[in-house]
Amino acid sequence: MLHLLECRGCRAQQTLPRRFHPGVVVAHLEQTERHGPCRREPYARELEYVHGVYRFELDCGWHTTGRWLKDVTVAEVAVLVQAFVDAALAAQEGPLSPDAETEARTA
């Protein structure tokens, strides 16, 4: 999804089109959610969007009882998308050169 940030409109508004928001949440859930003490990353998929809440199903894949639902509000999605965009823009900019770092501190 990083290539989406090459869109001038997305970069200027520092966001992504709404159709990509569930994908950002899926990636976040797969990285952060776990089935009890299991350390395996679950598989996450979007099920539905109703009244401002996205519902996702997560599946551990290693345990028969490792399937659960996670609801994520629009406000929570906005925070996750902003964090994703901020990280992607920072990664594209790369580290500052020593000269640019000095200029930034003295400006």
Image (spheres, rainbow, N blue to C red):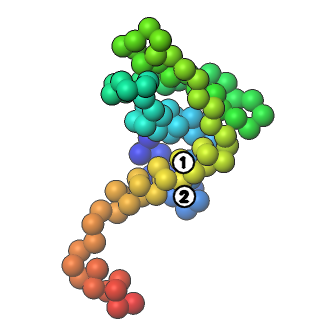
User: Which one is nearer the viewer's eye here, 32 or 104?
Assistant: 32
Q: Position of residue 72 (x, y in %)?
A: 62, 37
Q: Nearer the viewer, mark 2 or mark 1?
A: 1
Residue lying farthest to the front in this orientation: 37
Identified at 27% across, 85% down, the residue is: 102
Instruction: Classify mark 2: helix, strand or loop.
Output: loop
Residue lying farthest to the bottom in this orientation: 106
Other-residue count near label 1 (Cα within 10 Å), few / some / many at <14 / 14–19 / ≥20: many
Q: Is residue 27 visible?
A: no
Q: Which residue is mark 1?
A: 81
Q: Is residue 80 visible?
A: yes
Q: Is residue 26 left or right of residue 104?
A: right
Dot 2 or dot 1, earlier in sequence: 2
Residues at marks 2 and 1, CA–CA distance in whole angstroms:
9 Å
Give residue 107's quadrant in the image.
bottom left
Residue lying farthest to the top in this orientation: 64
- Going by the numbered disc 2, the residue's amino acid type is Gln
Q: Position of residue 49 (x, y in %)?
A: 70, 29
Above/below status of 56 relative to 95:
above
Quadrant (top left, top right, bottom left, bottom right) of the N terminus: top left
Q: Which residue is mark 2?
A: 14
Q: How many marks?
A: 2
User: Which one is nearer the viewer's eye here, 90 or 69?
Assistant: 69
Instruction: Classify mark 1: helix, strand or loop.
Output: helix
- Residues at marks 2 and 1 touching, judged by CB atoms closer than 8 Å: no
